[in-house]
Image (cartoon, rainbow, N blue to C red):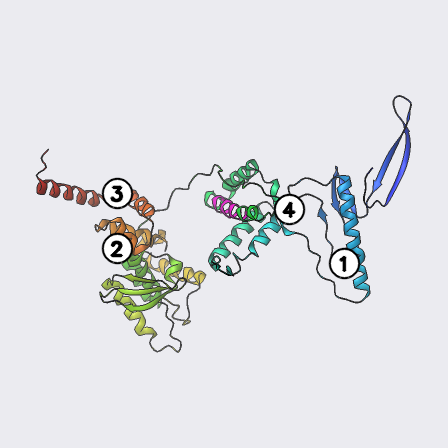
Amino acid sequence: MATGHVASARLKSSMSPEGKAVGIVKVSIPNIVWREGRPRFQPGPKLRKLGYKGEDLKHPDGRWFTLEEAGQWAATRNAEISARRKTKAEGKRLAPVRRPKHQTIEGLFEEWQESPKFKGGTNVGKRQETGVSAATAKDYKYKINALKAFDPDLMQEPPAAVTAVVAQGIFDRLWETKGLHTARGVVAVASSCWKWAKARGRGGITLNPWLALEKPMPQPRLVTWTDEEIVAMAAAADALGRPEIGDAVYLGLFTGQRQGDRLVLEKAGKDDGGRLLIRQSKTGAIVAVPAAPQLVARLEAAAARRKDAKVQWPHLIIDETANAPFKSDWFRHLFAQVRTEAAKTVPSVAGRRDQDLRDTAVTWLGRAGATVPQIASITGHSFVSINQVLRHYLATHPEMADAAIGKLLSWMKETGVAV
């Protein structure tokens, strides 16, 4: 016999195969409907006006409520409904009806995005943690929305319903329809959310199913610009009245910094060795960059163009037409325009991307004989990343091998090694 609030119960007599009378109890719970043994709260029009919405009655781990649990839940909800009706009758404002967001995958993502990680970090006592950048938060939201659009039904499931097998299936289907990069990105964001939820007891999560999936690494895009392409790009930028795009190309070539970082780098003068001092606006760290004449010439020309502007921005690169720091989308738009113009004289430029300048910086420095630590001190790459880039280009740039053998022969001669 179910306990809790029961609206009605009636006995229906019938006969068993043995000829004995048996009773069947039919239980009805207000506003609860059953679909193949699965209970759901189904509010009518009056309750919807009170702010209620339909919801499946499940535990955080995905188990459906039993009849008894549904009755107890309904009793609690009915008491809440009575209180809200009373509040409304008294003319008072009703507070929004809220349920734990972590009951569904969509809600869990929303709760995660409302955490301090996305809201500026944590600043409590000695615990000082910065949150993710606005660009990272935007990227996470993009990938979450990609998963939501890909499988909207999944977003209404409880988080604990995602097992390792389910996670692998989601990844495989994303890979087939959206590509490997998108699939890996979505899984990485989901894994980060599950890690956060597991540590805080959200969603009935006891393990992270997104870890240890079979997800191959995509082939790296390692493309370098040629000197002819660099010159053509800068010339096209100047011709179109957008010299700041050419400046950004040279800054990428001689510093190896990512596009997003270059757009917020700030001027900080020069050191005693004549190196350019550049401040990273996010961290405030000062980076000393050797003053390559080509880069210095372009930055000095930019300073001359901007000297009469009413607002003097500290950024090395700005949108000079608007006299304001670049927004990344607008920069990419202008970059594409300049690239199209440059391709009229050097067609190969059409296949180049701004992010290729980072690999170009590593490759050119390597071809010039710079060591891995020396390259890292300029570009900020990890040693592993630099070795990966250089290994890719060893076969395409035989002069590097020539230089290595030349050094070996010189060492052999100097030390008397004879073979």
Comparing marks 1 and 2, which lies closer to the viewer? 1
Q: Which mark is residue 50?
A: 1
x%, y% of residue 174?
52, 42
Residue 180 pos. (x, y %): 46, 42
- Please report the bounds of the magenta region as a residue range: 183-193
Which residue is label 3 attached to?
A: 394
Task: Find numbered disc 4 in the image and state the secondary structure of the residue it sits on.
Answer: helix
Q: Which mark is residue 156?
A: 4
> Mark 2 sits on what residue?
227
Separation of marks 3 and 2 at Cα, in angstroms = 18 Å
Disc 1 is placed on an element classified as: loop
Residue 257 location, quadrant: bottom left
Residue 410, quarter of the rendered image? top left
Q: Is residue 130 magenta?
A: no
* Circles 4, 2 touching at the beta carbon (< 8 Å): no
The mark that comes first in sequence, 1 or 2, is 1
Is 21 above or below relative to 111? above
The mark that comes first in sequence, 3 or 2, is: 2
* 221 displayed left or right of 37: left
* Amino acid on which the number 2 mark rests in the picture: Asp
Could you say whether the residue bearing mark 3 is in a helix, strand or loop? loop
